[in-house]
């Protein structure tokens, strides 16, 4: 019998019959009466005669072979920790609360389920970061693995890095081996296709890979942050082939419209229902102050006009109320952008980088024109001249346009740059409320109590 080479993956000849035999009956275990411990038997022909020209695994080791195959396929899949992203923990309606987004995601969910049952053609998942497309792609991969089907997952940036490193003499895998593997695996999941930033060499490799899989008609799942129409034309012509490819848009908004920190489970759970405005351990005056802040937030959420500014020490509840306003507006289907100020400044800086997919003007306009903007944690990180200038440009625009905004801060208005604070104290547009409650996480005595204006 020919010896099976298991040192590398032969991706051209995947089949259910690749199970190799192994001896059984060792270490005192009872010897199988069928194979007598050999682990394999000669199959019977249709005539009932024994076919001595072939061997097949005996029933005594098939369970062990299936286990080994499952372990091998899981390791081969390259999913790693992403194997935890499955259909069981994927919400069929997605992450957003508005009905239109839920229905769109439900359609994607149903299509992904159908594709996982019968992976044929290409499935392209488009949407901004955090919309769930990687979860959907990994759920498809995991379902196929559970059915004993080989699948290989890899991020496109990692794939290109691996291909480059394969040229190194010290590499354990040759370039040809790796490229043949991703070209010919029955189901390939390519995560995070990014248009525009790839080098000519990278574009050439992607074209070779996708052209091969398209021509051979191999099942492929591709995720991308970009609308398909913005992808390079030579790749786009493959992705949009209606006879072979499905393009599913999970969320149509730009990543700039993403709810930022609201994507975190902690902030999504910060609602008016979960806010404890009673806090019976506090003195009556502080409880009344907290209830007043709660009522102001609820009123603002129902009809956001002007600016609502919450001051107070860390942990007093101001971020919870700001997030509750955002979650309420989002649940009502209204646009809202929740941004932590330090993250905003980092994002602005990144737009000036050579690899940025978003220009400063694009991001700035999104912030300026958001129907409701929530700036959380306006603090000392905004003290540099550059940061002050960028924040002033944003706040001044929304001040002149009379666009609604919520701001939370640990600072007194005396500690905020004058051009900005002068707009915050304008009673024609702004209400500043000082939350006097201490840190709810430990009743920590506040370092300072900002003045109420």
Image (cartoon, rainbow, N blue to C red):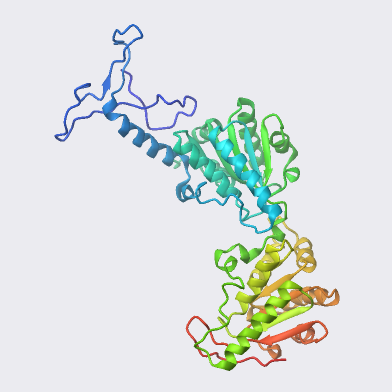
Residue 297 position within the rendered picture, expressed as x and y whole percent measured from the top left: 68, 78
Rendered residue at 65%/74% (across/down): 322
Relative to 42, 444 lies left or right: right
Above or below residue 252? Residue 407 is below
> Quadrant of residue 210 in the image?
top right
Relative to 1, 102 lies left or right: right
Q: Mark yes or no: residue 167 visible.
A: no
Q: Mark yes or no: residue 412 visible.
A: yes
Residue 38 position within the rendered picture, expressed as x and y whole percent measured from the top left: 22, 23
* Quadrant of the drawing holding the C terminus: bottom right
* Quadrant of the drawing holding the N terminus: top left
> Quadrant of residue 184 in the image?
top right
Tell which residue pokes out farthest to the left in this image. 28
Above or below residue 119? Residue 370 is below
Residue 63 position within the rendered picture, expressed as x and y whole percent measured from the top left: 31, 32
Above or below residue 191? Residue 426 is below
> Quadrant of residue 343 in the image?
bottom right
Residue 402 position within the rendered picture, expressed as x and y whole percent measured from the top left: 83, 75
Rendered residue at 56%/72% (across/down): 274
């Amino acid at each position: 019998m020919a010896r099976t080479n298991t040192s590398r993956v032969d991706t051209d000849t995947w089949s259910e019959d690749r199970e190799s035999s192994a001896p059984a009956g060792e270490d005192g275990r009872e010897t199988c009466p069928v194979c007598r411990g050999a682990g394999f038997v000669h199959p019977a022909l249709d005539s009932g005669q024994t076919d001595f020209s072939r061997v097949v695994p005996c029933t005594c080791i098939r369970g062990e072979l299936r286990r080994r195959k499952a372990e091998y396929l899981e390791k081969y899949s390259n999913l790693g920790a992403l194997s935890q992203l499955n259909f069981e923990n994927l919400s069929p309606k997605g992450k957003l609360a508005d009905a239109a987004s839920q229905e769109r995601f439900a359609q994607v969910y149903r299509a992904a389920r159908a594709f996982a049952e019968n992976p044929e053609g290409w499935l392209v998942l488009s949407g901004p970061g955090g919309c769930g497309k990687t979860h959907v792609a990994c759920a498809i991969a995991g379902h196929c693995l559970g059915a004993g089907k080989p699948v290989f997952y890899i991020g496109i940036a990692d794939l290109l890095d691996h291909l480059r490193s394969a040229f190194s003499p010290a590499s354990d895998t040759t370039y040809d081996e790796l490229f043949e593997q991703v070209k010919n695996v029955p189901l390939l999941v390519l995560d995070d296709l990014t248009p525009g930033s790839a080098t000519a060499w990278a574009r050439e490799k992607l074209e070779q890979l996708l052209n091969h899989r398209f021509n051979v008609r191999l099942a492929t799942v591709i995720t991308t942050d970009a609308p398909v129409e913005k992808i390079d034309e030579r790749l786009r012509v493959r992705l949009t082939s209606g006879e072979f490819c499905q393009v599913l848009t999970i969320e149509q908004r730009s990543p700039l419209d993403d709810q930022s920190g609201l994507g975190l489970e902690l902030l999504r759970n910060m609602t008016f229902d979960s806010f404890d405005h009673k806090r019976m351990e506090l003195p009556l005056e502080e409880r009344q102050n907290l209830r007043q802040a709660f009522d102001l937030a609820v009123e603002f959420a129902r009809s956001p006009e002007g600016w609502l500014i919450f001051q107070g020490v860390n942990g007093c509840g101001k971020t919870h109320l700001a997030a509750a306003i955002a979650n309420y507006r989002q649940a009502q289907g209204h646009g809202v952008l929740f941004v932590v100020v330090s993250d905003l400044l980092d994002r602005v800086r990144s737009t000036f980088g050579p690899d940025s997919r978003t220009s400063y003007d694009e991001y700035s306009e999104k912030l300026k024109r958001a129907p409701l903007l929530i700036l959380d944690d306006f603090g000392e990180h905004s003290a540099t001249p550059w940061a002050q200038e960028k924040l002033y440009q944003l706040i001044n625009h929304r001040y002149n346009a009379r666009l609604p905004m919520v701001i939370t801060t640990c600072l007194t208005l005396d500690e905020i740059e004058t051009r900005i604070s002068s707009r915050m104290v304008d009673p024609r547009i702004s209400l500043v409320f000082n939350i006097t409650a201490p840190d709810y996480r430990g009743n920590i005595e506040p370092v300072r109590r900002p003045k109420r204006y």
